[in-house]
Amino acid sequence: MDDFIKQEIEKRLKRQMNELERHIFSAMWSEHCGYLHSKNELKKFNRIGALFPDENAGGVKIGDWGVFFKTESHNHPCAVEPYQGAATGIGGIIRDILALNARPIALLNSLKFSFSQKHLIEGVTRGISDYGNSCGIADVGGEVIFDDNYYDLPLVNVMALGIAPINEVKLSAAKEDCAVVLLGSPTGLDGVGGAAFASKELNSNKSEEKIHVQIGDPFVKKKLIEATLEILKLEDVVACQDCGAAGLLSSTTEMAYKGKCSLELDLDKLHLAVNNMSAAQILLSETQERMVFALKKSAIKKVFEIAKKFELEISEIGKTFKGCDYVVKKGGKILSKTPLDVICNPYVYNLCPRKSKQELDKECNGEMDIAEAVNKVVSNPEFSSKRWFFEQWDYAVGGRTFIPPQKAGAAALKLFENDYFVGVCMDSKPRFCALDPYLGAKSTFLESYRNLVSSGFEPLGLTNCLNFANPQKDDVSADFIEAVGGLADISKEFSIPVVSGNVSFYNETGDSKIYPTVTIGMVGSCKSEKELIEAVFSGGESVFLLGAKITPDSFVGGSLYQKILFNFLGGRVDDSNYDFEIKLKNAIFELRKKGLLQGAIDVSKGGALGALLCVLFNSDIGFCGSLLGDGKYTNSQKLKMLFGEIEGRYIFSTKDYEGARQYLEKNKIPFVYLGECVGDKIKFDGFEFELSELKNKYFNSISEVLDRV
Amino acid sequence: MKAAVVVFLGTNCEVETKRALEFCGFEAEYVNFNANNLDNYDAVFLCGGFSYGDYIRSGRLAKFTPVVEALRKYIDKKRGVTVGICNGFQVLCEAHILKGALVENDCSKFICKNVPLELKFNGIVKNISLPIAHREGKYVCFEDVYEYEFLKYLDNPNGSMQNIAGLYDCKNRVMGLMPHPERAIFARNFGYDGKEIFKIVEEEIKRG
């Protein structure tokens, strides 16, 4: 804690902090818990239409059900202990959903690594696999990005999604005269100080940091999920909070502060894993698999019986009453009595906007033989199939998964409760955000948006995870302001609310820092199985490109091909056009309704050719046609047209060439006819490739490296 | 036809197993691990998940529960058909109700994917596909289990002996399989072949 913050706290308390309070404030006023550098900016987000955006997780309404979702980062723990770091990241985000009385039904991951750090890739993947699979929550999708920018700074963003009838949602505000109960694993020394650890730059000596990483137990978590959902059915249970960052301290203070009452904890009453823990250690322990409840005295007996049934430990640890203080007792003595409005209202910084705009005029002019370029792109780990990852995660448990990972832009889950389908995806475009945080954030939003649309879903809401370096540095804070601005503007424009979110700062070590990385999780819905669209084409179908055309003047900065082929990052990022995107969405849905659309994919990584190739590989079908048309272009212009990434484009297939063409012409929707799905070769503009050869590279390039002993 | 869906602590496929059973014409209800009588049911399903955290070994601890004791009696008196899916198969092997054991996959990773299988039952051979999701699914046995083989991998994903994906002990009417038929009922991406397994269970119940 720096002097300025210390003075600010003591000014508000109008006295000096005692020893325990120093621990309390170091956690609650940390960046991780208090959002000191981000709170002011995050106010800009559009929340209209969101369900409970101020709770542990927010949601959207689908039918008469609430679908709640949130992302969380576990970047710092994964850098030092990838297996437990990833596992407890999953554990934490599940509890956020659970606290609302929503049953978690899906997980997604957005992972970033340097491809050279095999131990991090394997550790994180296995951590997710062991933990998520055991809990019985389907891991339905997400993304993996490889870039040396993330060397030693892996990003592990996880998202959970749960469902609850809207009128059965439990909130986190306690009331006066409740008992406070702690359910789950005995509190121990693991993860003590985790929130503070996540609020600073990483130390180069990682073994020293391992004490701050929590340890997960998926078996206890599974029992905790079932027990919590049973407890929250009881009417006399008033509020629920999960123990995440800053453990018992943050859950109980927030509960009382939101409920406008005092809360007293008696630390002698807790079930502990080790003897002789200090008050600060008990409050700050981040032992996993714990939930806190505030309940009326009448419910205590029933709640203890439920705990017993699931073989979980439970203790009554305190009470609420009229007032506005946080009281901590141990050994019969009151150790601290602190006003909750000081604990829960940390000092908030105003960030400085950018003083001078950087120049972005550089263009990528590299040249490369097209055949060589195609082979390079297809076998690049970032472009190629992420099957190696997804097959280690149970994407089918629960029996709701109707579109598994990589079969379409978004995963589809059936809500058997009301027969709707939920679509969900998770995306980020770090290189776009590095070039232009404002447009990059917008572009990320649109990527998710088009992923949902191309899978047949109407987008409804989003969550975000903002990963940045040290916000006390001017360029980082400026990046942050611009990225939040981009996301806020576009979510208003599209009337899609930001329902929840998470910020992870201090992703830097020594001289290196991460690209500003905006991760978005977006959720949509559709009403029937018929409306689902997969990124699968069949033989004999015609392929159309829908939307904007790339010209030599288009802005394609940030495109993946530039990095793969020329290790180039520069140029301007394309801007979005609201009316155009809506027009394309309506066209996709209309074509589907008329039976004129069989398969579809949005155009993103690898541009038009990249999108086409992905579908052909997944569908195991060849292609014959043209992507460049008749014009005369230089080699670098051709590369740009084949692989460049701009906004507002989809590719779809149809059995009815004439019908689709007439519909598009009549409605004045820009399109290009690309060709036919046919045979076992991929032919365009004079180039020819064996489908099986490219497909093999696409599916196996990651496993060939990672499975090599 | 009334089926019990046994729920141990850590079981996590009970909901879709019950749903699939009901879709296939069964009446189904959950039975807790404390239950000590199963005589009410024509079939007993031990479903997928991680019973008791799969501590020590997959399926190892569940055999100490009252419901598995009750299951032994249920099988002894030939009351009905027993089916163990994934973790349920592991439990049946650990309890020595079926022969052999399920050990870690050759690749030492969890595998979740749809796999092609050969289903051999009552002299009829069919190719079907079902999803698998396990890390400990490699079947091994020191004895010859040829007479019990009813489901085999066509492209062995885990190193199982004789490509075994499932066993059926016809005499005791006990079935165990690693693939998840309950996941291939509604979800169009896993096909509808799960119904084949439930159809066999139905036939076996009727056979008596």
Image (cartoon, rainbow, N blue to C red):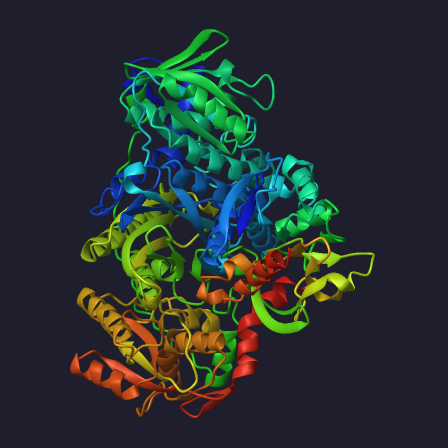
Residue B181 vs A35, above or below: the answer is below
**Figure label count:** 0
Which picture quadrant has residue B123? bottom right
| Residue that lies at the very extreme toward the right in this rendered image | B143
| Position of the N terminus of chain A by quadrant | top left
In front: A465, or A516? A465
In front: A330, or A432? A330
| Residue that lies at the very extreme toward the top in this rendered image | A332
Residue A664 vs A351, above or below: the answer is below
Residue B99 vs A196, above or below: the answer is below
Residue ID at (30%, 69%) = A361
In front: A565, or A456? A456
On the rendered structure, is B78 left or right of A423?
right
Q: Position of residue A411 (x, y in %)?
A: 41, 60
Q: Is residue A1 visible?
A: no
Residue A383 vs B100, above or below: the answer is below
Q: Is residue A315 visible?
A: yes
In front: A252, or B11? B11
| Position of the C terminus of chain A by quadrant | bottom right
Residue ID at (45%, 16%) = A19
Q: Position of residue A72 (x, y in %)?
A: 41, 44
